Amino acid sequence: MSGADDKEMDFRVGDADVNVELEAMVREFFADTVRVLGLPRSVGEIYGSLFISREPLALDDLVDLLGISKGSGSQGLKMLRTLGAVSEVSGIEGRKIFYEADVELKSLVGGFIREEVRPHLRSARVKIGHMDACNEGGDVHYDERIKKLNNWRKRAGVMLPILQKLLGK
Amino acid sequence: MSGADDKEMDFRVGDADVNVELEAMVREFFADTVRVLGLPRSVGEIYGSLFISREPLALDDLVDLLGISKGSGSQGLKMLRTLGAVSEVSGIEGRKIFYEADVELKSLVGGFIREEVRPHLRSARVKIGHMDACNEGGDVHYDERIKKLNNWRKRAGVMLPILQKLLGK
DNA sequence: TTTGGTGTTCATTTTATTTTGAACGTTATG
DNA sequence: CATAACGTTCAAAATAAAATGAACACCAAA
């Protein structure tokens, strides 16, 4: 006898119980969390579903589970793949692709830095270069500010590897 | 003779030239940058204006300069004050309040952490507590995941002071 | 080669966020 | 006191972001 007898919040799937309420809380949690990072809510819901799920899930499962459209699910998974936050589970029957959440903080942060932070720092370097070129007269006040900006950028650049190192286990 | 004779992009204000093109680039830069942090564009434009301006600016100046509404400017300045990213300049004539940008990376990051990051970590702690309480049966898989989540949260908590220390000049 | 199952793309719709601007406090000044 | 200069608030409008779903591509099995 395994559960599913005291609350309507549990129901059987395979041979283990699913705590529907808990799983919903976790999805909600990630939905809120990724919002802070500027990612769409559905991406958080998808990641949360995979994070808390006992077994890998396919696009269809997520669509059913979350009540989102296939398009939304597909795009969300794409983003998560790009970030390296989920990976395909190999060796499951059929053509359907199953995913599981990557749960290593190190690689999650690494993926975010690589895909979201680094590109911004790169473009910042270019823009600051343009600013400097635009300060033809070499005005001292402008020059000071541009230098400060560039200083910030450089500090961010050295901070990231340190951050990643500190998070590495 | 001070500039303003080779391009229409410069014009005189007080006794120093304003490089209109450069200042626009800086505003644009900050507008893009704060977007990454999840703050509205106008907030970045306001901060950028103050950052690059030779002298402190009042709400009216910003409204004129940026072509935004008084309401937008007021709310933007409020947000920047809360973040500690701007400060009122004391001792200027009249009732008008002038602002200048705080340009210490340390305090900018500090303000962002205090106002944006810490509250999220706090609420995360509460939510994770709820999850744990919700896992009544003590299911081992769920327990493992909840523990991992809590671990992440704790690591973020210890990371922030380190980050701030490293940024402290 | 057709059919059915999967996944992706992208123009459109929906939803969320940001901006606006009119109404309203407040305070200095005539 | 009346007026004007400033700043704030908040409901409504405008804009930006995300979700939808139909069309399509692909591939494996029949």
Image (tube, coloured by chain):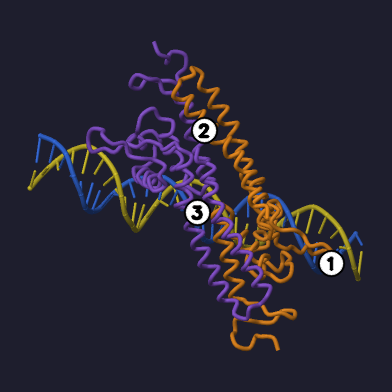
Chain colours: A orange, B purple, C blue, D yellow
Which residue is pictured at 65% across the width and 68% down the height?
Answer: B145
Give the quarter of the image for residue A20. Answer: bottom right
* Image height of B28 relative to B132, above or below: above
User: Both on one chain, marks 1 and 2?
Assistant: yes
**Circles 1, 2 touching at the beta carbon (< 8 Å):** no
How far apart are labels 1 and 2 at the CA level? 53 Å
- Residue B131 is situated, as x and y percent measured from the top left of the image, at 57, 72
Kind of residue sitting beneath label 1: Gly
Residue at image mark 3: B117
Q: Is residue B115 visible?
A: yes
Residue at image mark 2: A149
How far apart are labels 3 and 1 at the CA level? 43 Å
Q: Nearer the viewer, residue A113 or A72?
A: A113
| Dot in front, 1 or 2 | 2
Disc ID at residue B126: none
- Residue A123 is situated, as x and y percent measured from the top left of the image, at 60, 36
User: Both on one chain, marks 3 and 2?
Assistant: no
Disc ID at residue A94: 1
How far apart are labels 3 and 2 at the CA level? 23 Å
Which residue is pictured at 55% across the width and 31% down the height?
Answer: A150
Kind of residue sitting beneath label 3: Val
Q: Is residue A79 visible?
A: no
- Residue A37 is situated, as x and y percent measured from the top left of the image, at 57, 52
Q: Residues within 10 Å of mark 2 (few under 14, many from 20)?
A: some
Q: Residues within 10 Å of mark 3 (few under 14, many from 20)?
A: some
